[in-house]
Image (spheres, helix red, strand yellow):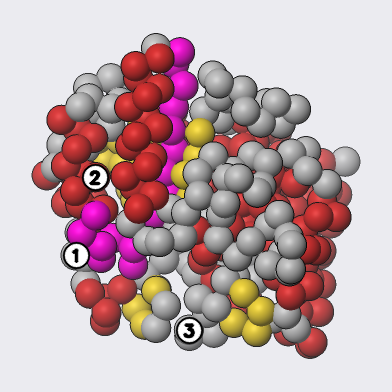
Amino acid sequence: MNQSEIHATKKFAAQIRLETVREVGTRGFGHIGGSLSVVDALAVLYGGVMRIDPKNPDWPERDKLVMSKGHAGPALYATLALKGYFPVEMLKTLNQPYTRLPSHCDRKLTPGVDMTTGSLGQGASTAIGLALAQKMDEKGARTYLFTGDGECNEGQVWEAALFAPQHGLDNLTWIVDYNHKQLDGTTEEVLDMGDIGAKFAAFGWHVQTVDGSNVEPFEAALNAASAETRSPSCIVMNTVKGAGVPLIEEIELNHHIVLEGEMLQKSIAHLEKVLAELERGAA
């Protein structure tokens, strides 16, 4: 990334954060913590790394993304809307009756969503299925998979982790959102995963660990993963649950919270200020 690209990606991330908070705020509650922790990664992926066409969401040769931690759907929806898959105005319908933006991702409802997710662990298996099909098609497409660190408590995750290296899925990049929190406690309290990267490496994965709030090294890690031709890649992404919104970061259990009134107004004001500063910096 050159400096212009870094700045553009940071601005895109700020826009995604702002729209994600507004989106959840229209409902008054939702899965905001784990949505905000993946925003910077989504900005990098959809900002230029992934091979996509918003005007043709079903393009067969596109790269695909599976948000296995399906409760981060609001961040993915905001990203897709800003990329032009559907109007930004539609974000106001999040989790409302007859919405096309349900609480968890649904590929049959939302343009740009490649896989239905929400039952934790299952997205790992479906992402591997997509990557295996892409490998057979020989079109050069990649699959990107997001799981939470708490989600890695699921046994299905490790069955999938065993399968991918044996089948040479070097077109699969698995991103672990390591924000150290899950529904009702820290990952260390609920079920300590120890060194997640070491576990993936022992299973035959090419592993990198990065700061998930820093777009430049994350993009470099994605490029290194794409260049790996011997094994699938895992990027352990150190993040903060609620990242980028101080009032939400400070809440101990911020997996699913009420977001309305003064907290919502102050959060939006903070993000509008961040975005305005980035826009002035580009002038």
Vertical arrangement, residue 206 with respect to residue 109, above or below: above
Q: Which residues are magenta?
A: 139-156
Q: Is residue 192 left or right of residue 251?
A: left
Residue beneath label 3, please?
A: 253
In the picture, the quarter occupied by the C terminus is: top right
Tell me, yes or no, whether the highlighted magenta stretch contains residue 151. Answer: yes
Instruction: Please tell me how crowded label 2 is: few (under 14), some (14-19), or many (20+) other residues with Cα within 10 Å.
Output: some
Viewer-side label of 3, 2: 2
Marks 3 and 1 sit apart, C-alpha to C-alpha, by 21 Å
Quarter residue 256 falls in? bottom right
Vertical arrangement, residue 37 with respect to residue 199, above or below: below
Residue beneath label 1, please?
A: 194
> In this orientation, which residue lies closer to the viewer: 96 or 91?
96
> In this orientation, which residue lies closer to the viewer: 205 or 219?
205
> What amino acid does circle 3 point to?
Leu
Vertical arrangement, residue 259 with respect to residue 195, above or below: below
User: What x and y, as percent, mark residue 189?
Assistant: 26, 81
Q: Is residue 39 visible?
A: no
Marks 1 and 2 sit apart, C-alpha to C-alpha, by 19 Å
Q: Which mark is residue 75?
A: none
Quarter residue 262 falls in? bottom right
In the picture, the quarter occupied by the N terminus is: top right
Q: Is residue 62 left or right of residue 234?
A: right
Chain-order first, disc 1 or disc 2: 2
Find numbered disc 3 in the image and state the secondary structure of the residue it sits on: loop
